[in-house]
Image (cartoon, grey):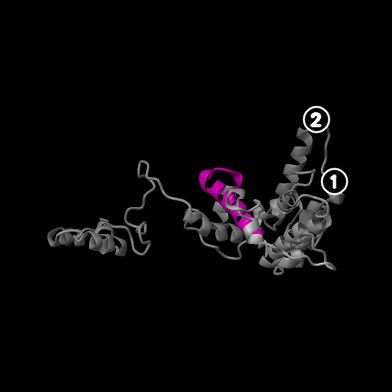
């Protein structure tokens, strides 16, 4: 709950609507302060596949008004449609309105940071945010362009490397998404992680999950960050309980299943190492033994 504006999700059925109203009534009775839900200020939105008859029945139970969409929640769009630039245009407007006289890092990091943790911003918007901060640094205005003596990329380098430590918008966005993805990995029992697992990968792990049918833009953004996250992670073997011996791909080349035959004899990486050392991976007798092995 934030600012007394919670979002409740459910199936578009009369039974689900009745259950929600029952929970809200219990919530009101449990509070000694007498706080009640204002149904007149509450609203309901439906997915496109809900019929008018079903809508009328549900609205009668909930005693709320129907709206096409709920606008913004916590400063972010409640729904993300086809036009990502239009949805996130308010971020650019807020940055432009506060850049004058304000430190670049304060504005560029603070205003879009929450959105960057949930969504991958469109490339056009990221480029615009970089350009606005760059123009402010060099003193450029729409009517008075100044020379940019160094590229924005070089200014985003660490101070030890000759830069000023500014945040490049695309990289910063991806870093924040990777942080959220890592939270799902290390804290799988969190409410967000459990919700995503139930919806998108009930029989898999985050590392092997797919987009699924009609994924949310948040899920699309997290999977986009997963590719980058995988480059900086390594699986440290513990007790071996989670290792899929007969199904996991070879860690060295990621091409085939990591069985003994492939890992020690057929893996291109292993063969290259053996050639450099001038040795054979295994004698033919041992190769024959591995060929006869099976998961059973």
Q: Earlier in the sequence, mark 1 or mark 2?
A: 2
At 76% from the left edge and 33% from the top edge, which residue is drawn?
A: 30
246 or 255, nearer to the observer: 255
Quadrant of the rendered structure where residue 267 is?
bottom left
- Classify residue 271 as left or right of residue 4: left
- Residue 67: percent from left, percent from top: 81, 60
Residue sticking out furthest to the left: 285
| Magenta-colored segment: predominant secondary structure | helix
Query: Badge 2 is on which residue?
Result: 32
Q: Secondary structure at mark 1?
A: loop
Name the quadrant of the N terminus.
top right
Position above or below: 243 against 146 = above
Residue sticking out furthest to the top: 32
- Classify residue 5 as left or right of residue 268: right
At 70% from the left edge and 47% from the top edge, which residue is drawn?
A: 19
- Residue 145: percent from left, percent from top: 80, 67
- Residue 249: percent from left, percent from top: 36, 59
Region in magenta: 169-192
- Classify residue 224 as left or right of residue 291: right
- The answer to the question of whether label 1 and label 2 lie on touching residues, with beta carbons closer than 8 A, is no
Q: Residues within 10 Å of mark 1 (few under 14, many from 20)?
A: few
9 or 166, nearer to the observer: 166
CA gap between label 1 and label 2 equals: 17 Å
Position above or below: 212 against 111 = below
Name the quadrant of the C terminus.
bottom left
At 54% from the left edge and 52% from the top edge, which residue is drawn?
A: 197
Query: Badge 1 is on which residue?
Result: 38
Q: How many numbered discs sit on the rendered protein?
A: 2
Q: Is residue 48 visible?
A: no
Quadrant of the rendered structure where residue 292 is?
bottom left
């Amino acid at each position: 709950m934030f600012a007394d504006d919670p979002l409740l999700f459910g199936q578009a059925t009369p039974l689900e609507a009745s259950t929600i109203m029952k929970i809200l009534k219990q919530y009101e009775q449990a509070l000694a302060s007498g706080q009640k839900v204002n149904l007149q200020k509450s609203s309901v939105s439906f997915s496109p596949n809900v019929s008018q008859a079903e809508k009328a029945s549900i609205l009668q139970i909930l005693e709320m008004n129907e709206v096409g969409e709920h606008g913004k929640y916590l400063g972010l769009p409640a729904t993300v449609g086809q036009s990502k630039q239009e949805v996130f245009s308010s971020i650019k407007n807020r940055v432009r309105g506060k850049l004058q006289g304000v430190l670049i890092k304060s504005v560029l990091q603070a205003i879009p940071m929450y959105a960057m943790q949930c969504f991958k911003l469109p490339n056009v918007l990221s480029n615009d945010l970089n350009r606005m901060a760059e123009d402010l640094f060099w003193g450029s205005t729409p009517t008075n362009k100044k020379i940019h003596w160094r590229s924005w990329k070089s200014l985003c380098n660490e101070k030890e490397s000759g830069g000023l430590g500014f945040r490049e918008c695309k990289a910063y966005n991806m870093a924040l998404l990777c942080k959220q993805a890592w939270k799902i990995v290390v804290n799988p029992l969190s409410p967000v992680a459990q919700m995503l697992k139930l919806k998108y990968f009930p029989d898999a792990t985050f590392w092997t999950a797919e987009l699924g049918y009609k994924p949310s833009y948040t899920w699309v953004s997290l999977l986009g960050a997963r590719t980058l996250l995988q480059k900086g992670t390594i699986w440290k073997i513990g007790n071996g309980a989670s290792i899929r011996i007969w199904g996991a791909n070879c860690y060295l080349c990621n091409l085939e299943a990591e069985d003994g035959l492939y890992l020690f004899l057929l893996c291109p990486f292993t063969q290259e190492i053996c050639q450099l050392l001038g040795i054979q991976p295994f004698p033919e007798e041992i190769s024959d033994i591995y060929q006869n092995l099976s998961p059973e």
